[in-house]
Amino acid sequence: GAVVSQHPSRVICKSGTSVKIECRSLDFQATTMFWYRQFPKQSLMLMATSNEGSKATYEQGVEKDKFLINHASLTLSTLTVTSAHPEDSSFYICSASGDEGRTHGYTFGSGTRLTVV
Amino acid sequence: QKEVEQDPGPLSVPEGAIVSLNCTYSNSAFQYFMWYRQYSRKGPELLMYTYSSGNKEDGRFTAQVDKSSKYISLFIRDSQPSDSATYLCAMTRYNQGGKLIFGQGTELSVKP
C-alpha cells in the first residue's frame, strides 16, 4: 500500500528559530500534499494544501509567512515553521494524495511533535 | 453546524464487546468515506475506505455508509485492548484532490 514518511518524528527547538519538517511519498507520486495540525484530544485541522510546482493554498487563519510550504517534487513536501514560538508547539501531520487515494483512501505520515522552548 | 459530526466519547467497553462508532454529515456531495485509527502521538492509520453507499468488511471491522441518511458507521467485533485508540471518520468528494473533512474523533478504551 501507499506509504508516507514524515521526519523528524519529534523536535525541540528554541524560541525564534526555524524548524523544517519533511513529508515524502515513498512508493507513489503525490500530486497533492496536505499539512495538518492537531492539538491534544482534538481532530486534525487542515493548514494548507500544496500541489507540486505551485504555491500552497492556506486555510483561513493560517499565517503563510510563518508556515512555509514547499512542494518541489512529486514525492517531497516540506513545512518550515519560521521564528517558532511556544504557541506553535503542536503535532503536525502530512498527508499525500495520488491517484490511489480515490480507490484506496488517503495515507498520512506518522506525525511530528514540535516543542518550542 | 459542522460538516461532519462525531461523538467524541470517551467510550469504554469490555474486551470482546461489539463497538459501534458513528458519524453524521451534512454535505450530500461526499462520496468517499474513511475511518482512521490514531494511537496517541502517532499519525492516523487508514482502517476502512468506502466509496458511496454500502457495507465493507475487513476482518473484525465493518464499515457502513447510508448516503440517504447521511450516516456512516464503523463496527468492531470482538474488541481487543489493542483497539484502544481514537477513531476518526473522514470524507471527501470528487475533485477535492484528497482534501478530507474529519469528524472530531471518538476515543475508545477496551478494558481487559
Image: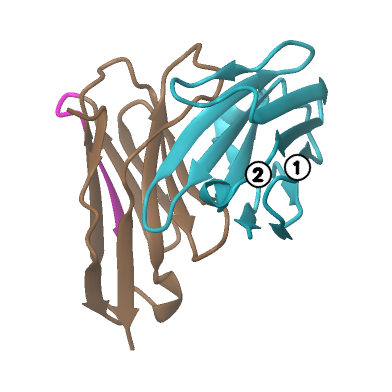
Chain colours: A cyan, B brown
Left or right of B12, for residue A89: right
In the picture, the disc for residue A18 is 1
Question: As displayed, is residue B26 above or below residue A108?
Answer: above
Q: Main secondary structure of the magenta part?
A: strand
Please name the amino acid that badge 1 sits on: Ser
Please name the amino acid that badge 2 sits on: Ala
Q: Tell me where residue A114 sits by quadrant.
A: bottom right
Residue with the mark numbered 2: A84
Q: Residue at x 54, y 63 (%)?
A: B41
The x, y position of residue B67, in whole percent, is 23, 26
Same subunit, labels 1 and 2: the answer reads yes
Q: Chain of mark 2?
A: A
Say whether disc 1 or disc 2 marks the residue closer to the N-terminus: 1
Q: Residue at x 64, y 30 (%)?
A: A66
Please say whether residue B78 is visible from this viewpoint.
no
The number of callouts visible is: 2
Q: Chain of mark 1?
A: A
The x, y position of residue A49, in whole percent, is 59, 22
The x, y position of residue A35, in whole percent, is 60, 34
Front residue of A48 and A14:
A14
Left or right of A8, for residue B63: left
Quadrant where the N terminus of chain B lies? top left
Magenta stretch holds residue B48: no
Q: Are marks 1 and 2 in contact (CB under 8 Å)?
A: yes
Q: Residue at x 35, y 25 (%)?
A: B52
Question: As displayed, is residue A7 above or below residue B67?
Answer: below
Question: As displayed, is residue A96 above or below residue B97?
Answer: below
Question: SS class of the residue under badge 2?
Answer: loop
In the picture, the disc for residue B89 is none
Say few, some or many: other residues with alpha carbon within 10 Å of mark 2 (under 14 / 14 to 19 / 20 or more): many
The x, y position of residue A93, in whole percent, is 60, 45
| Residue segment shown in magenta | B68-75
